[in-house]
Image (cartoon, rainbow, N blue to C red):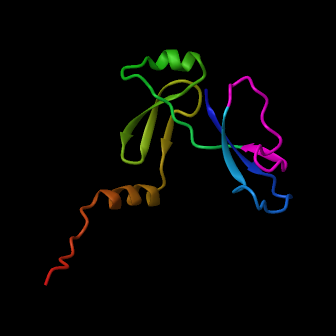
Amino acid sequence: MPIYEYELNDDEPECQICTGRFDVLQETNEQPLDRCPGCGLPCHRVVSRASFKVRKGGDAQKAADKGFTTWRRAKAGEWEKVAGPGVDAIVGSEADKEAIADEKKPKKKIDLGN
């Protein structure tokens, strides 16, 4: 069962009971909540981080048959499509590539000793 995130509607006053954002464990076929279970104010479901566990050696074509696109890293900041819908390649901007290169550079160590 997935965990869905909700938050209070923006046009509502700030709640004094709850934090305004909460998680609910729900079946995928359940209707989204329209009220906070803690305070009863109107709420809506928000897009949140998803996590998927993918088996190693999965079949890219099987994923494509289900509507997913599989990408393979070609080089830093560039990915090429293996199978599925969408563009043939994703290429990061020069600024993105420089940021990736900067992250890989060794950090200078500072000696804080006496």
Closest to the observer, 110 or 85: 110
Closest to the observer, 67 or 19: 19
* Vertical side of 91 occupied by 112: above or below: below
Q: Position of residue 62 (x, y in %)?
A: 51, 15
Q: Residue at x 79, y 37 (%)?
A: 33
* Vertical side of 27 occupied by 109: above or below: below
Q: Is residue 66 left or right of residue 29?
A: left
Q: Quadrant of the N terminus?
A: top right
Q: Quadrant of the C terminus?
A: bottom left
Q: Position of residue 56 (x, y in %)?
A: 37, 23
Q: Residue at x 44, y 39 (%)?
A: 79
Based on the displayed image, in which of its 4 quarters is residue 15 positioned?
Answer: bottom right
Main SS of the magenta segment?
loop
Q: Is residue 91 left or right of residue 8?
A: left
- Chain part drawn in magenta: 26-45
Q: Residue at x 20, y 79 (%)?
A: 112
Based on the displayed image, in which of its 4 quarters is residue 31 positioned?
Answer: top right
Based on the displayed image, in which of its 4 quarters is residue 50 positioned?
Answer: top right
Q: Residue furthest left?
A: 114
Q: Position of residue 23 (x, y in %)?
A: 65, 42
Magenta stretch holds residue 28: yes
Q: Residue at x 37, y 38 (%)?
A: 74
